[in-house]
Image (spheres, grey):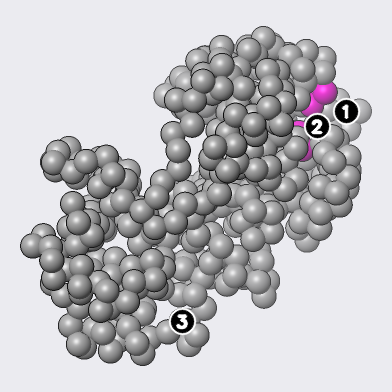
Amino acid sequence: MRLGGRIAAAIEIIADIETRYRPAGDALRDWGLSHRFAGAKDRSAIGNIVYDTLRHRASARFVFGQDSPRAAVLGTMFLHWKLGAAEINAAFGVDPHAPERISPEEERALSQHGLADAPDHVRADIPAWVAPRFHATFGEDWVAEGAELAARPPLDMRANALKAAQVKVLAVLDKFAATGARYAPEAVRIAPTEGESRHPNVEVEPAFQKGWFEIQDAGSQIAARLVGAKAGEQVLDLCAGGGGKSLALAAIMGNKGQIFATDNDRARLAPIFDRLKRAGTRNVQVRPAGEALADLADRMDRVVVDAPCTGSGTWRRHPDAKWRLSEHGINERGSQQRAILASAAAYVRPGGTLTYVTCSVFQDENEDQIAAFLGEQPGWRLLSAEENLALAGLPPLAVTALARMRQPGGGILLSPRRTSTDGFFIATLERAA
């Protein structure tokens, strides 16, 4: 396929996503099944156009001066792929599958509608109704924070200390220009892609198959460190999902002690078994979804709640989610978070800690949940950022930098602009001895 055909496909897929209000991954998969002539490179390039369009939907439509899938895609090509109107029309002119050429009126709109005078939410590439929440979290930096959440993400991995040091993983992934990442001592990073290029499939690498590294955002790695788990301790990962934090905790603990990993969703928990085996993890006991945990009550040194949330901190990776988000969805997640926090408290021993983690940047899901918990649960206190970081075993420079990420209402907030990671909120609570 030529560029014109790929753009036409992207417009069709964006229209499907918006009309049927469905995840981008589902729409891309269905398009691929019904257009089997498209090769792997075509599907990859189309996917990049679709995801970039979803990342920049607001700004792209603004510069194009229209509100349509065509405007969103062509505005993205102009604004973020740096293709001029003449260049786009030249590509369309040699491709019978291309959309209609950019008209003189549309070209004038592109030349007139720069982002300098655009509304703040447009420059941040977020829904207008979410802007007050971003301002509440980030203050005067909220537009820049939103724009960073609309950029392409890097590919982050965690060197598995049970099998390989970071330097060893960097060596085997040097062909992909892998580097370290700030603040997370085991992190290995491949920079964001540009244009039609895509990240390498690192899961086919022998080092991955040997368990030398796992795919995990550096922010998630920092969150695992802030749990403060030590060798020999008893830890409960209450919302383990696919096991990313359980694996990181096992490595931090040197396979000593016990980690209990569970999740209410069987499908989310299912991948953990293969991951544990590959990583050489021996101190993780998986509790099936829905199994009673009464035997763990008042026994755990550390409890981790990686709570279900809106995922606003992961909009770089899941940009379609920000346009499906609703006030009802935020309120529903808030109710779930409050219930999970209350139930998690029962497993912490006196003097133990409860670490609350979300991949959200909204105060509703973060500081407000901690405040509600403290108001309802006597005998608990929130650790300061400095106290929490003292548990983390991070390098001194990382501790100093992350201490500046404290939120006024307590906890630590990571973000692409602040820490070059996904957005994560981490707060650790201590039960009175």
Which corner quadrant holds the C terminus?
Answer: top right
Q: Tell me the CA gap for discs 3 and 2.
A: 44 Å
Q: Earlier in the sequence, mark 3 or mark 2?
A: 3
Amino acid carrying label 1: it is Gly
Amino acid carrying label 2: it is Gly
The reply to whether dot 2 and dot 1 touch (C-beta < 8 Å) is no
Would you place residue 299 above or below residue 179 in this image?
above
**Residue nearest the observer in this picture, 261 or 124:** 124
Most extreme residue toward the left is 96
Q: What residue is disc 1 on?
A: 351
State left or right for residue 118 relative to residue 233.
left
Q: What residue is disc 3 on?
A: 115
Most extreme residue toward the right is 433
Would you place residue 100 above or below residue 170 in this image?
below
Asked whether residue 229 is drawn in magenta, I would say: yes
Identify the residue shown where x is 44% and y is 49%: 318
Identify the residue shown where x is 58% and y is 33%: 173
State left or right for residue 316 relative to residue 76.
right
Identify the residue shown where x is 20% and y is 78%: 102
Asked whether residue 354 is drawn in magenta, I would say: no
Q: Earlier in the sequence, mark 3 or mark 1?
A: 3
State left or right for residue 3 relative to residue 427.
left
Q: Residues within 10 Å of mark 3 (few under 14, many from 20)?
A: some
Q: Which residues fall within the magenta stretch?
A: 226-230
Secondary structure under badge 2?
loop
Amino acid carrying label 3: it is Leu
Q: Earlier in the sequence, mark 2 or mark 1?
A: 2
Secondary structure under badge 1?
strand
Q: What residue is disc 2 on?
A: 228
**Residue nearest the observer in this picture, 288 or 2:** 2
Image location of residue 259, percent across then percent down: 69, 17
Image location of residue 155, percent across then percent down: 53, 43
